[in-house]
Image (cartoon, helix red, strand yellow):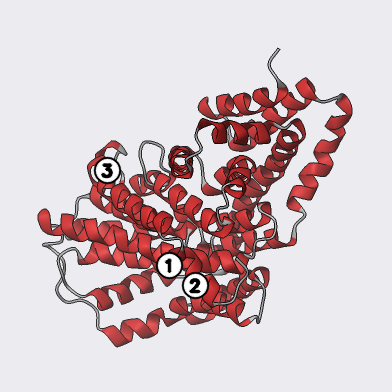
Amino acid sequence: MIPAGLLLIALLAALLIIGAPIAVALGLSASAAILAGLDMNAMGAIATTAYSSIAKYPLIAIPLFILTGIIFERSGVARHLVTFAQAVIGPRRGGLALVAVMVSLIMGGMSGSGPADAAAVAAIMLPSMSRAGYPRPFSASVIAASASTAILIPPSIALIIYSIIVPGLDLRALFAAGLIPGLLAGGAIVLPVLYLSRRHDFGRGEDMQWPPFWPSFRRAVPGLLAPVIILGGMRSGLFTPTEAAAVAVAYGLIVGSFIYRSLTPAALYRAFADAAEITATITIVIALAGIFAWVGSTLGAFDAAAKSILNLTANPHLIMAMIMALLLIAGMILDGVSIYLITLPILVPIATSLGWNLTWFGVLMAMNIAIGQFTPPLAVNLIVTAKVGEISIESTVPWVLWLVAAMIGAMALVIAFPELALWLPRVLGYNI
């Protein structure tokens, strides 16, 4: 008979491989493990465990930040940010590709969702980049890669989940820790973008009459202020991360309704409905992941899995390499939130036993998951941009590999020099 703990993990893996929704895979594997390894009375704990998994105050920030991202996306902020980025970068070879990277970084500071940023930037940038002579597979690859930094640059939904699962972590410290690695990842993308643009003469058709700086800056100010309000408010102690999310929503409504005047009642209703739908999906996953985690902990499956990994080698560098490889593969298949929910019960004991700083480790996980979001064949960001660009995933591979290598290089720097992640929260006085 298969041990219940092994059944839990094996069934989850099997369901994910055959394409079952993540929530279904978590719920079925947990229920099967309960029936195999616990008594029937344990089934009564499912409802209370699911409720306790989502009845947490910090989780309120997730729907609010999702709504913030949707509102800013549909209020015209992205369009004005593109114009401003063009004015900053100016007419140069590869200029529009750099604009796509810059706008994605700024948008990441509003929504915390890579796929949402990829969709917003691709809808605006892909047509203009195509007219300027950029191949659509190259453009889609650049946008998908730069949008992946949203999981690092605060406010990151995945880092909110991480702070809830790992006890004792300060979300403000996590947000601060993700900022420099996020910018480093964006800078790493810029290097191959410039090289490939010049090597292949991309952008030869770019319009030399780029917008003037100050007028475009004035129109972009409302969007540029959003990350400042969110992060500045948390840093000053004026409001908590959850309160910052509520303030961001209110600010987005003011910008969209009264400054840009692009949020009609119908558009606003659609934004709330879409945010509710996305939130419901994430909440169901969190609730069922809570059951999965409780069952795994009760059966000792996660401790056994962690010990098995630690028994493979005593070399922490090899263990780190194995974890990073596992997370990269997972990032190609699953979204960041699901990866945190599934893997953290196993990985946190390993990180703790090896003495790794958990704030640094959370950022490393985010960087790795970000790479997976644009690594074929099942990269969520790349699927979004390829769909917008009406191209195949296969056509992006020659360009994506350059960007993957650059991001891996940036992640290697953060692994080698933890202060790249820990310096800023330490300077700001946060507990890490």
Q: Which residue is mark 2?
A: 424
Q: Position of residue 338 (x, y in %)?
A: 58, 44
Determine whether, in the image, residue 229 is placed left or right of residue 213: right
Q: CA distance from mark 1 to mark 2?
A: 8 Å
Determine whether, in the image, residue 101 is placed left or right of residue 283: left
Q: Amino acid at mark 3?
A: Thr
Residue with the most extreme right position: 41
Q: Amino acid at mark 1?
A: Ile
Determine whether, in the image, residue 131 is placed left or right of residue 290: left
Dot 2 alpha-carbon crowd within 10 angstroms: few under 14, some 14 to 19, many 20 or more:
some
Quadrant where the N terminus is found in the figure: top right
Q: Which residue is mark 3?
A: 396
Q: Position of residue 429 (x, y in %)?
A: 59, 76
Q: Are marks 1 and 2 in contact (CB under 8 Å)?
A: yes
Q: Which residue is mark 1?
A: 180
Q: CA distance from mark 3 to mark 1?
A: 28 Å
Q: What residue do we see at 58% from left, 73% from top?
A: 248
Q: Amino acid at mark 2?
A: Leu
Q: Are marks 2 and 3 in contact (CB under 8 Å)?
A: no
Secondary structure beneath label 1 = helix
Q: Taking the image as drawn, is residue 257 in sight?
A: no
